[in-house]
């Protein structure tokens, strides 16, 4: 329980820290209408759904475009950066065969969006077929016209977990 509390506290601080780095021209939801925020939330939901498909198909070229060069990835077995994540996907060391998404929540603040997925992930990990329940946290930043993923974190949860909206 303590580790889960620590993790969520870290995510909150990450979100606050990234949000505070915005320039006045892009800061805060106050400059965005409810319609713009809803459109952005839908765009992020769609981008996340596409990402799961690209991961299953091992489309590392598309993922390389999505992942920011400084992106961090946290899995059950460790954490690493963009190049290693792409290599793991390309070689099939972790093959994300199917992510069944049960629940999604998105929060937008200026040019930063955080998406939470509650999923059942069917994967092949080093030759072993596994199925796990996760809440996956994805942090995106708009850079020009594109959204780039800055962070991707898997948290192990019970199948009865619900994302608070």
Image (cartoon, rainbow, N blue to C red):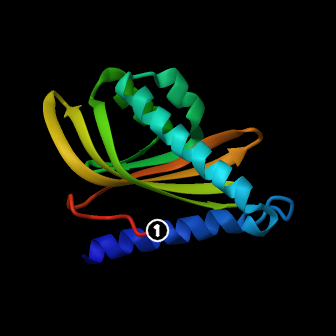
Q: Secondary structure at mark 1?
A: loop
**Quadrant location of residue 16?**
bottom right
**Quadrant location of residue 144?**
top right
Q: Which residue is mark 1?
A: 165
| Residue 141 on image: x %, y % | 65, 50
Identified at 27% across, 64% down, the residue is: 161
Q: Is residue 62 visible?
A: yes
**Residue at the left extreme, as displayed:** 128
Quadrant in which the N terminus is drawn: bottom left
**In screen coordinates, is 39 left or right of 118?**
right
Identified at 75% across, 38% down, the residue is: 145
Q: Is residue 151 above or below residue 11?
A: above
**Residue at the front extreme, as displayed:** 35
**In screen coordinates, is 101 left or right of 143?**
left
**Quadrant location of residue 43?**
top right
Q: Nearer the viewer, residue 148 or 83?
A: 148
Q: Is residue 110 visible?
A: no
Circle 1 crowding by C-alpha within 10 Å: few under 14, some 14–19, many from 20 = few
Identified at 21% across, 34% down, the residue is: 125
| Residue 146 on image: x %, y % | 69, 38
Identified at 15% across, 38% down, the residue is: 130
| Residue 68 on image: x %, y % | 59, 40
| Residue 122 on image: x %, y % | 22, 37
């Amino acid at each position: 329980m303590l580790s889960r509390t620590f993790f969520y506290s870290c995510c909150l601080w990450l979100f606050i820290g990234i949000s505070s780095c915005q320039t006045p021209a892009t800061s805060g939801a106050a400059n965005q209408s409810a319609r713009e925020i809803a459109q952005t939330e839908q765009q992020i939901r769609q981008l996340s759904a596409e990402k799961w498909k690209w991961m299953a198909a091992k489309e590392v070229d598309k993922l390389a475009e999505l992942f920011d060069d400084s992106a961090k990835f946290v899995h059950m077995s460790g954490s690493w950066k963009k190049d290693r994540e792409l290599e793991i996907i390309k070689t099939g060391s972790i093959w994300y065969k199917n992510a069944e998404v049960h629940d999604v929540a998105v929060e937008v603040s200026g040019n930063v969006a955080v998406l939470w997925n509650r999923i059942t992930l069917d994967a092949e990990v080093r030759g072993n077929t596994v199925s796990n329940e996760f809440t996956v946290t994805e942090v995106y930043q708009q850079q020009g016209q594109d959204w780039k993923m800055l962070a991707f974190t898997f948290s192990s949860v019970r199948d009865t977990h619900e994302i608070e909206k």
